[in-house]
Amino acid sequence: MPNPRNKIKLDSYVELRKEFEATDLYRNVEAGATGWVRDSKVDEGFPMIFIEWDENNPKYAGERDKWVYESHFKVLDDEDRTIEKYIDAIRGATDAALGGEAFIIIAIVKTIHPITGKQIYKPVIAGESINEEASLVLEAQIAYMASQLFNEYVEETLDLFKKEKEDESGR
C-alpha cells in the first residue's frame, strides 16, 4: 500500500545512488543498478521502498528484491530510460556480432553540414566479416533491405502524388 509520505511513486524506475553502493545493505549490486518501486512505507520515521531489481542491468549481481531506504535511490526519467535502453541494445548487438561471422552497424550521427552550417543527421556505416561466405550473405542481406526500403519509398511517394492529384481535382 503506497504511503503518502514517500516521494517516489509506485512503479517508478529507480537507480541506486553512487554514495550508497559500498554499504552492507547492497552486497550484490553497484551504483547504477536499477529497479522498479513496487511498494512503499515509513519504518521508524524513514521512508522505505520495496525494490524489484532489474536483472538485465549489468550492475545487478543477484541482489534479492527487498525493502530499502528511499533516499538511496533516484528516479530515472524517460530520457534516462531511453538512453539505458539504447545502451542495452548496443550491448546486445555487440554480443551478437562477437558470436557471429559478419556484422553491420548503421549509426545516425548528429553533425553540422559543412556548407549550410545547419545541424543534420548523417548515417555512418561500419561492417566486417571473418570469411568470404559470411561477407556474401551480409551483402545480400544489405541489398535486400535496400530494395525493401526503396519499394516503401516509391509506394509512399506514389500515395502522396495521388493524394495531391485528388486534392487538386476536388478544388
Image: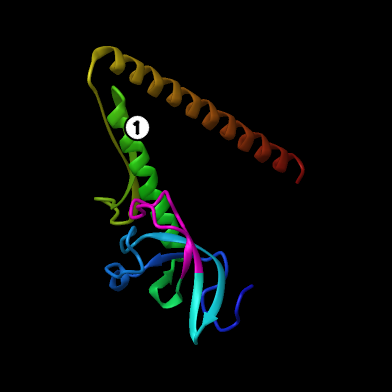
Most prominent secondary structure in the magenta stretch? loop
What is the residue that sits farthest to the top in this orientation?
133
Q: Is residue 53 left or right of residue 11?
A: left
Residue 59 falls within the magenta-colored stretch: yes
**Residue occupying the point 39% across, 49% down:** 86
What is the residue that sits farthest to the bottom in this orientation?
45
Question: Label 1 is placed on what type of residue?
Answer: Ala
Residue 34 falls within the magenta-colored stretch: no
Closer to us: 143 or 55: 55
Closer to us: 15 or 45: 45
Q: Position of residue 108 (x, y in %)?
A: 35, 44
Q: Is residue 123 left or right of residue 151?
A: left
Q: Position of residue 22 (x, y in %)?
A: 27, 68
**Residue occupying the point 48% across, 29% down:** 149
Start-end of magenta stretch = 50-67
Q: What kind of colouring is applied to the model shown?
A: rainbow
Q: Position of residue 107 (x, y in %)?
A: 33, 42
Mark 1, residue position: 96
**Residue occupying the point 29% across, 12% down:** 133
Residue 71 vs 100, above or below: the answer is below
Residue 102 vs 61, above or below: the answer is above
Q: Position of residue 119 (x, y in %)?
A: 33, 55
Closer to us: 142 or 147: 142
**Residue occupying the point 48% across, 64% down:** 66
